[in-house]
Amino acid sequence: MASSDRLPRSYYSLINELPLKPVEDDAELAQAHAILERLFHIEGDAGVDAYVDVLAGLVDAYERTAFPTEAEPWQVLEHLIEARGLTITALAKQAKVTSATLTRVLEQRRPITASTAVKLASFFAVSPEVFLPRIPVA
């Protein structure tokens, strides 16, 4: 790799903090979530962006295995809120979704819209698909 192809030092700094490897348990998942949450709120360079892309993919791979897709979208949301120790108000503010929307989703009074799924997925570093209803295949 040519020296101009190297990633910025920020990437290697993050690698030292949490090496990029498959997530193996909930403790590693919590550590990855904490780092992703911190990095989502800063203006990163190419090194930070590359690290976030890979780490988010590793988190997604673990969550797909640890949290089977048979769960309803509201159940996935409920689990992620509890796992992070969030309140609905805190999640609403950080994910830029109204508290009323989140409450109605959790009470199963409304589905999660595509735009809300994208916002939640970005916040939780998961695929938007986990927040969308499964359509049965005939």
Image (cartoon, grey):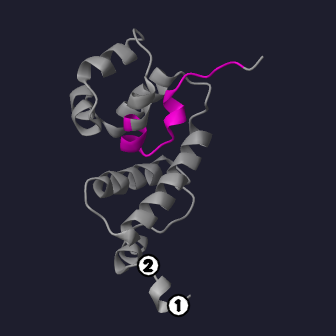
* Residue 95, horizontal then vertical, whole percent: 29, 37
Q: Residues within 10 Å of mark 1 (few under 14, many from 20)?
A: few
Residue in the image at 31% along x and 58% along y: 39
> Which quadrant of the figure contains the C terminus?
top right
Amino acid carrying label 2: it is Leu
Q: Which residues fall within the magenta stretch?
A: 119-136
Residue 20's disc is: none
Residue in the image at 28% along x and 29% along y: 97
* Residue 31, horizontal then vertical, whole percent: 39, 55
Q: Is residue 75 magenta?
A: no
Residue in the image at 62% along x and 41% along y: 65
Residue 7's disc is: 2
* Residue 74, horizontal then vertical, whole percent: 45, 21
Question: Left or right of 122: which side holds 24?
Answer: right
Picture quadrant of residue 16: bottom left
Q: Earlier in the sequence, mark 2 or mark 1?
A: 1
Q: Residue furthest top?
A: 109
Question: Left or right of 61: which side holds 53?
Answer: left
Disc 2 secondary structure class: loop
* Residue 44, horizontal then vertical, whole percent: 30, 65
Q: Residues within 10 Å of mark 2 (few under 14, many from 20)?
A: some
Do the residues bearing badges 2 and 1 touch, measured as CB atoms within 8 Å?
no
> Which quadrant of the figure contains the N terminus?
bottom right
Picture quadrant of residue 101: top left
Q: Is residue 130 magenta?
A: yes
Residue linked to disc 1: 2
Question: Left or right of 43: which side holds 31?
Answer: right
Disc 1 secondary structure class: loop
The answer to whether 36 is drawn above or below residue 75 in the figure is: below
Residue in the image at 36% along x and 32% along y: 81
Amino acid carrying label 1: it is Ala
